[in-house]
């Protein structure tokens, strides 16, 4: 039988930290009578007592408005703090910045679909980073299947003969599949579908023209150095016709690839790796997926520029237009210069 005069056990959170009277909240567990002294910055969170009873830490309007609660854990195997998205700050772009100080490590489970700001996951625990990395790989794999699978299916249906004629239908199927994944997956692919400031639209024409000139010059140099580099793309374009070629090679990639790479993949990689490394890794993936080793430097350079443009403009739309005009110009050339 419990002694009613027995003093309750006293525990502190974070463990082993001496808390002054003016920086702590005092809370008692009604189940086991353990008395808790909790750091004031954890207002609004839940705490799991040693008896497994969850206790609500009182909050206040100021703490919730500033969303400046910290999650600091010394022992990740005994974490009693429950993360809540409402306690995270949102920057001017609507992206979530994790609460706490720069030195804090977030051990509490971070929502897998939270629109995190660049570099936010660098402060996350190993288990959180693993969950985010796995989700990134799953989403990217599904998106690649949606993008490339219908083209492979068209090739199988045509038994390798005239499969190019099925590519317009394959592009439509890819669009439907990507839209379905976009509806299921996280918010990164949708965040960039917004307007951009006029200064970013002013880049479109000069950047497109410069990119086309560089690509043509690079192609001429490559042809002069290496014989037999023709890939038959001009024949494919002429067989499809101008309208179908623009749909398959200009419209579809401009929409789908920008959402996939600069939207969903780049958004997650920036949260995991930070802005510069995330953009570079996204550009590498973009270049490799095109499967043309000879022109990989061109695709890598374009991917890096489009990645930074998406970040500067806070929008996917200027990059989509550049992507369309660049591909559309190259597609149109066989018809313009046809003998």
Image: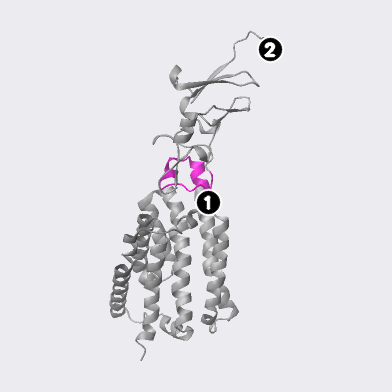
Location of residue 64 in the rendering, given as x and y in whole percent from the top left corner: 49, 34
Write the residue at 46% across / 52% down: 268
Q: Quadrant of the N terminus?
A: top right
Label 2 vs 1, first from the N-terminus: 2
The magenta stretch is 111-131
Q: CA distance from mark 2 to mark 1?
A: 49 Å
Question: What residue occupies the far bottom of the structure in this picture?
Answer: 339
Label at residue 2 = 2
- Front tag of 2 and 1: 2
* Percent of width and height locating residue 44: 53, 31
Q: Residue at x 48, y 41 (%)?
A: 126
Rendered image quadrant of residue 184: bottom right
Mark 1, other Cα within 10 Å: few <14 / some 14–19 / many ≥20: few
Q: Position of residue 225 (x, y in %)?
A: 28, 78
Query: Where 54 sits versus 178, above or below?
Result: above
| Residue 149 point in image, percent of width and height | 55, 69
* For residue 260, above or below residue 331: above
Asked if the residues shown at circle 2 and circle 1 are in contact, with their CB atoms under 8 angstroms apart, the answer is no
């Amino acid at each position: 039988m419990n002694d009613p005069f027995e003093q309750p056990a006293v525990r502190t959170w974070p463990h082993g930290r001496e808390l002054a009277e003016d920086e702590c909240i005092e809370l008692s567990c009604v189940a086991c009578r353990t008395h808790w002294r909790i750091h004031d910055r954890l207002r609004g969170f839940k705490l799991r007592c040693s008896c497994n009873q969850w206790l609500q830490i009182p909050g206040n309007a100021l703490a919730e408005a500033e969303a400046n609660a910290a999650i600091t854990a010394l022992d990740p195997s005994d974490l009693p703090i429950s993360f809540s998205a409402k306690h995270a700050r949102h920057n001017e772009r609507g992206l979530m910045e994790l609460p706490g100080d720069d030195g804090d490590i977030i051990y509490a489970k971070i929502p897998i679909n939270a629109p995190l700001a660049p570099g936010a996951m660098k402060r996350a625990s190993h288990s959180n980073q693993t969950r985010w990395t796995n989700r990134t790989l799953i989403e990217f794999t599904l998106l690649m299947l949606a993008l490339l699978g219908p083209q492979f299916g068209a090739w199988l249906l045509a038994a390798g003969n005239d499969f190019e004629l099925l590519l317009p239908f394959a592009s439509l199927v890819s669009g439907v599949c990507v839209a379905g994944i976009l509806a299921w997956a996280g918010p990164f692919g949708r965040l960039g579908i917004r307007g951009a400031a006029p200064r970013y639209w002013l880049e479109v024409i000069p950047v497109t023209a410069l990119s086309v000139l560089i690509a043509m010059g690079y192609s001429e140099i490559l042809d002069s150095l290496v014989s037999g580099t023709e890939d038959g793309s001009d024949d494919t374009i002429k067989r499809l016709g101008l309208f179908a070629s623009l749909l398959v090679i200009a419209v579809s990639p401009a929409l789908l690839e920008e959402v996939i790479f600069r939207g969903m993949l780049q958004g997650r990689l920036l949260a995991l790796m930070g802005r510069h490394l995330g953009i570079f890794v996204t550009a590498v993936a973009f270049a490799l997926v095109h499967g043309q080793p000879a022109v990989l430097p061109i695709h890598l350079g374009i991917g890096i520029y489009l990645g930074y443009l998406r970040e500067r403009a806070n929008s996917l739309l200027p990059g989509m237009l550049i992507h369309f005009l660049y591909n559309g110009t190259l597609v149109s050339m066989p018809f313009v210069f046809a003998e």
